[in-house]
């Protein structure tokens, strides 16, 4: 292989837009407006235009976004919030930190995401909110989820850290971007996310004016006016440097998503005949921005395949090796909605292959042939 295969090639991506990024960064440095410089406001507007959300509120990272979103809802300790068991820890963690009760529900085997059926199993009279996570780049079925939420007066906070740019289709054929459908959408600009910055960053989105105002206040110590603190808040900001480079990268996001999609089609074409694995399924109600290309490896062969690939110079990752209900941190804190069999099954079989905007067909052909060689 002429170029070393990586899970995510950030340097390669940077090289292609280097002059533009460097210029944007040096503009910030030359004015030294590192906190709340004009680029932050520009990015807010650019992301509002891109997503169609009425309000974007930038913040320090995706985990903060989820925490601030929950803080804005005025929930009481002991109130229950439904989250998937098979996902990244952030959503469940902030629920627990705020002394709310994470109710962990199972996920759909095909999409890795929660559906109405799973949410219904976690629902009780104490449920106040749902956090659907749009895992690996595909939206949850949001129409049925928001309908259920409206019926039971629940808040919906979308964890859209992995699916920025994906759109969800409704039964009247209208489309909305993931992250703009519930009461609040949260996203992360962690470097390896589909829209990543050069450090930590995050944002919240909402179409609700009153919620937007609350979210904004909470990010600045609960103040509306300087030194007047209306509520308890925190300090969570998107650095001007990060906003400046996100302004550059946002212009390329659709192109990046297309590249990921094409790479995914290549994998799926080549791997669908390998009987020992299952390729990812695309759901009819969502587009897919392939934050991860995640296969399921049958018959307990996942770890063997991972090791073999690594020996062939092909990195791969297990997202996620342990479901949240099995994590020590949630002992005595979380509730489980029934048996979480699918989540358990997924943790034992999933394997994410290299997926990024610089992946070449030559690299992919090599990866595919290594997988085929392993299964002989
Ligand atoms: C990355 C991620 C987060 C957290 O984002 P940070 O910016 O790292 O705090 C939350 N949820 C999901 C699903 C993620 O993938």
Image (tube, helix red, strand yellow):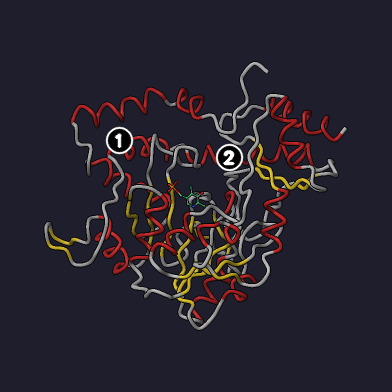
In the foreground, 81 or 146 = 81
Q: Quadrant of residue 35?
A: top left
Q: Residue furthest top?
A: 2
In which quadrant will I find the N terminus?
top right
* Image location of residue 230, percent across then percent down: 18, 67
Q: Residues within 10 Å of mark 1 (few under 14, many from 20)?
A: many
Separation (CA) of disc 2 from disc 1: 26 Å
Q: Is residue 94 above or below residue 126?
A: above
Q: Quadrant of residue 99?
A: bottom left
Q: Residues within 10 Å of mark 2 (few under 14, many from 20)?
A: some
Residue visible at 24% across and 60% down in the picture: 217
Q: Is residue 368 left or right of residue 141?
A: right
Q: Residue furthest left?
A: 227
Q: Depth-wise, is mark 2 or mark 1 nearer the camera?
A: 1
Describe the element under mark 2 as helix, strand or loop.
helix
Describe the element under mark 1 as helix, strand or loop.
helix
Q: Is residue 55 above or below residue 366?
A: below
Q: Is residue 107 left or right of residue 30?
A: right
Lower position in the chain sequence, tag 2 or tag 1? 1
Residue visible at 75% across and 30% down in the picture: 308
Q: Residue furthest right?
A: 376
Dot 2 corresponds to which residue? 258
* Image location of residue 87, percent across then percent down: 57, 55
* Image location of residue 11, percent across then percent down: 48, 25
Residue visible at 65% across and 56% down in the picture: 112
Dot 1 corresponds to which residue? 241
* Image location of residue 186, percent across then percent down: 43, 56
């Amino acid at each position: 292989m002429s170029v070393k295969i990586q899970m995510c090639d950030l340097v390669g991506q940077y090289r292609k837009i280097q002059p533009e990024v460097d210029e944007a960064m040096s503009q910030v440095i030359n004015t030294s407006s590192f906190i709340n410089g004009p680029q932050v406001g520009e990015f807010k507007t650019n992301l509002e235009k891109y997503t169609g959300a009425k309000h974007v509120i930038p913040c320090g990272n995706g985990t903060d976004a989820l925490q601030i979103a929950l803080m804005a809802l005025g929930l009481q300790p002991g109130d229950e919030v439904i989250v998937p068991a098979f996902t990244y820890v952030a959503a469940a963690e902030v629920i627990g930190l705020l002394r709310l009760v994470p109710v962990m529900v199972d996920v759909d085997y095909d999409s890795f995401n929660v559906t109405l059926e799973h949410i219904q199993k976690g629902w009780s009279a104490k449920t106040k909110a749902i956090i659907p996570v749009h895992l690996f780049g595909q939206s949850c079925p949001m129409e049925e989820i928001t309908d259920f939420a409206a019926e039971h007066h629940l808040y919906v906070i979308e964890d859209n850290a992995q699916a920025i740019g994906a759109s969800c289709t409704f039964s009247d054929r209208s489309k909305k971007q993931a992250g703009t459908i519930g009461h609040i959408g949260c996203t992360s600009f962690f470097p390896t996310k589909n829209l990543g910055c050069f450090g930590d960053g995050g944002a919240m989105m909402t179409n609700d004016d009153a919620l937007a105002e609350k979210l904004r206040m909470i990010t600045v110590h609960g103040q509306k006016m300087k030194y007047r603190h209306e509520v308890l808040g925190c300090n969570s900001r998107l650095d001007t440097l990060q906003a400046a480079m996100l302004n550059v990268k946002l212009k390329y996001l659709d192109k990046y998503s297309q590249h990921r999609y094409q790479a995914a089609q290549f994998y799926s074409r080549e791997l669908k005949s390998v009987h020992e694995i299952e390729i990812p399924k695309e759901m009819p109600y969502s587009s897919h921005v392939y934050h991860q290309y995640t296969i399921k490896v049958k018959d307990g062969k996942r770890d063997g395949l991972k090791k073999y690939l690594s020996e062939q110079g092909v990195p791969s990752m297990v997202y996620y090796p342990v479901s949240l209900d099995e994590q020590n941190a949630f002992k005595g804190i979380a509730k489980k909605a029934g048996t979480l069999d699918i989540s358990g099954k997924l943790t034992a079989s999933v394997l994410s292959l290299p997926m990024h905007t610089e992946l070449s067909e030559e690299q992919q052909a090599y990866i595919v042939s290594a997988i085929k060689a392993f299964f002989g």
